[in-house]
Amino acid sequence: LVDEFQDTDIAQYQMIKYLSEVHGNLFVVGDDDQSIYGWRGARVENMLDFIDDFPECMVFKLEKNYRSTARILKVASSVINENKKRTSKNLWTDASAGEPVQIIECWNEKEEAKAVVKKIIEFCKKGGKRSECVVIYRIHAQSRALEEAFVEQNIPYRVIGGIRFYERMEIKDILSYIRIVSNPADDTSFLRIVNVPARGIGKSAIEKIEEIAKNRSVSMLSAAKIAIEEKLLPENNIKALSQLEKILERAGSFLLKKKPSILLDEILKLTSYQDYIKEKYADTAETRLQNIDELRSYFQLLEEEEPDITIAMVLDRIATQTSVDMMNEEDRVTLMTAHSAKGLEFDFVCITGVESGLFPYESWNSYMESEAKRKREIEEDRRLLYVAMTRAKKNLVITWARARHSGFLRGFGTISPFLDFIPKSDVVVMEYHDIEKSGKSKSKDMAHHAKTTSSEHSTKSKRNGIKTGDIVFHRKFGKGKVIAIEQGTVNKVTVKFETGKTKQIVETFLERNLE
């Protein structure tokens, strides 16, 4: 008897064959549409080939769904039906039609997070519980903007299958570097980074530095400098501490002259921290590097909103988000990746980032893969979205962002092609400003919507043609006139808005006003 058969790999399937070849008594249960672990060796082909390998087997299709409303089931089925390598099924339910699936277009990840919060508040006002709400995302780095929005609205939450953004090792390491540069008396930060990445400063050396700090009533960093000057440690420790001192001094020179994101990049460069992650944490390096990219993107987003923001102001912002303790609340919203959501169910489900680059997912090396492998991955990502959608019992909300700051996703995006064939009679499509201002939604033709946004993306991503004097539009600040352009890898445009404020904005977050 084998459960979750769709998650078996080659070796497991071979073992199953060996164990059953004498007596022939074999019973397997699985759903090929929920095979989402190909990255760890699971093969959907094990289910699809089962009938060929065991030609005398009997197949029973369990097609009645006991969880979701009819509309959710119909929309989810329209997504998975586009996969070629699957067993056909005709899912049905006795449940009522239920509410239409909501699809919300947002400007960026910050607006998306606000939309999610608004929808959860709306659900709870109607009698729902926060504990019956889940927010699902494709990668862990997406949680940062969501966590910020929940903290701002004082909504308790928990992160499943991971830890809160600012508690992740790589984020704590980088912020500790920034804090010690900003405040050399921060002993907690010093202790965290003194041997990260490893530079041969062991326990005994650190204890000696602590002793110097205590005896001379100075900070740990000052004690390290004393140890260097007075040669109070072995030569190898002195050499390592001297290198650390140079790193901090160099980073410190960026403190007042450069923007926070540039200081962050300089620290990454000086410490070779990303190489350290790749070498020491190879299995989780991609996720950790995505988190670092998200931190950088957050800094850049703050700089876009407040061009004069300092690193001290950024650290204060982060401190307000990390100081809120809601861990003891039982009625909490759940945050998790789509992979972690398998097997669970919630009354209210919101799936975020349902756009190209996330669904289907595109890593930094996707372009290097063979066409056959890429097709397999796309089909698995479609199954992953299907799994996420079918976690919903009563309400399903799907969000996507036209522009993201995050790492390799930075720039304009388009709604996921997985949604191209959703039946329009079962969905309500709206934009963020619809729910922000009036709460009313406007229905659109999904196919037309996808085609239009794709066309707009194509125009915007290639144009780089905003000129001084142009009238432009920013989703937050409104209409304004371009007064200067700073050319670079990323063009920065200075705009005087109708509100009277002048701001420097990254070009990709501006739309040329054609009226």
Image (cartoon, rainbow, N blue to C red):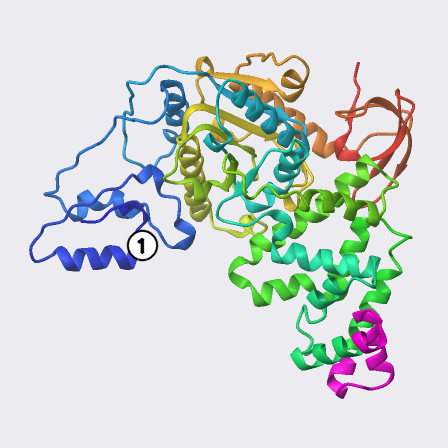
Q: Is residue 466 above or below residue 248?
A: above
Q: Where is residue 439 in the image (x, y as percent from the top left)?
A: 62, 14
State whether the magenta stretch is mostly helix, strand or loop. Answer: helix
* 347 vs 485, nearest the viewer: 347
Q: Is residue 81 above or below residue 11?
A: above
Disc 1 element = loop
How many marks on residues?
1
Residue occupied by mark 1: 9
Q: In which quarter of the image is residue 469?
A: top right
**x 63%, y 32%: residue:** 113
* 35 vs 347, nearest the viewer: 347
Residue 336 as seen in the image, left or right of residue 141: left
Q: Position of residue 382 (x, y in %)?
A: 43, 36
Q: Where is residue 447 in the image (x, y as percent from the top left)?
A: 52, 19
Q: Where is residue 238 in the image (x, y as percent from the top left)?
A: 78, 82
First to last magenta residue range? 213-240
Q: Quadrant of residue 344?
A: top left
